[in-house]
Amino acid sequence: MHSIDLNSDLGESYGAWRMGDDAAMLALVSSANIACGFHAGDPAGILATLRAAASRGTVVGAHVAYPDLAGFGRRDMEIGSADLQADVIYQIGALQGLAAAAGTRVRYVKPHGALYNRIARDEKQARDVISAIKAIDPSLALLALAGSPLIGWARDAGLTVVAEAFADRAYRADGSLQPRTLPGAVLHDPDEIAARMLRFVREGVITAVDGSEVRLQAESICVHGDSPGAVEMARRLRALLEASGIAIRSFCAP
């Protein structure tokens, strides 16, 4: 039987502002990218999400970001190497402490938003993030954009790298994500998303915004937890994959 990981960005609520439905998503995904307080998430909320993930046996990872609460981590930033490395180490360390208190542990790192897209192709910032992961825990896997140069840089540096595709994001012909500032960047139809990802798992192909076929290899699929209708997207995607004989399983061993 084929298998694939489903991941989602969780723990992003902040104080009185609620973001997504963590409990519902944890029932559907096999890996949870937990906010670390730089783009979203407050300590109490992060801890609650970690405890919920631990109770379900869901693998958790550190969703590190630029220091950008106001912009939800989606604004590109020029940051010196020393600061970026320290920021990433700080976020992973904080989440490791909360995870230990919740009875689980951090198994991987997935950069968020602008940082994710920047390091996919910017070697300088990519190597800063790689260095930070190696400094705090080189056993952590790195979740990275399928087909991006980051995968090679991280593997050459000795990290375990897991490539991912996005269920609810549109792709350009070069395999990069359609920027959120452009029309059609975020997909919303649960049935279309499920069918698109079933084809991807079976054939390794995604149709780009220009109609071309993009061939990618990935071990994980992301459904954004903050997207409207995220739970229904994840529910239909999981149901279709399982009905098609594809098991949902984390890329990390239990």
Image (cartoon, rainbow, N blue to C red):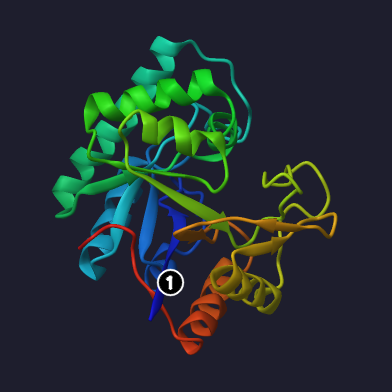
In the picture, measured across the screen, residue 228 lies left or right of residue 60, that is: right
Mark 1 is on which residue type? Ala
Q: Residue 4's image quarter?
A: bottom left
Rendered position, 168 above or below 94: below
Residue 181 location (% of width, % of height): 78, 41
Residue 251 location (% of width, % of height): 33, 59
Q: Which residue is mark 1?
A: 24
Q: Residue 58's image quarter?
A: bottom left
Q: Residue 132's image quarter?
A: top left
Q: Can residue 89 be seen in this snapshot?
A: yes
Rendered position, 208 above or below 100: below
For the N terminus, the quadrant is bottom left
Q: Is 244 in front, or is 189?
A: 244
In the picture, measured across the screen, residue 184 lies left or right of residue 192, that is: right
For the C terminus, the quadrant is bottom left
Rendered position, 241 above or below 32: below
In the picture, measured across the screen, residue 84 lies left or right of residue 176, that is: left
Q: Residue at x 24, y 33 (%)?
A: 138
Name the residue at the bottom extreme.
Answer: 243
Q: Residue at x 50, y 84 (%)?
A: 239
Which secondary structure lies at badge 1? Answer: helix
Q: Is 56 in front, or is 218?
A: 218
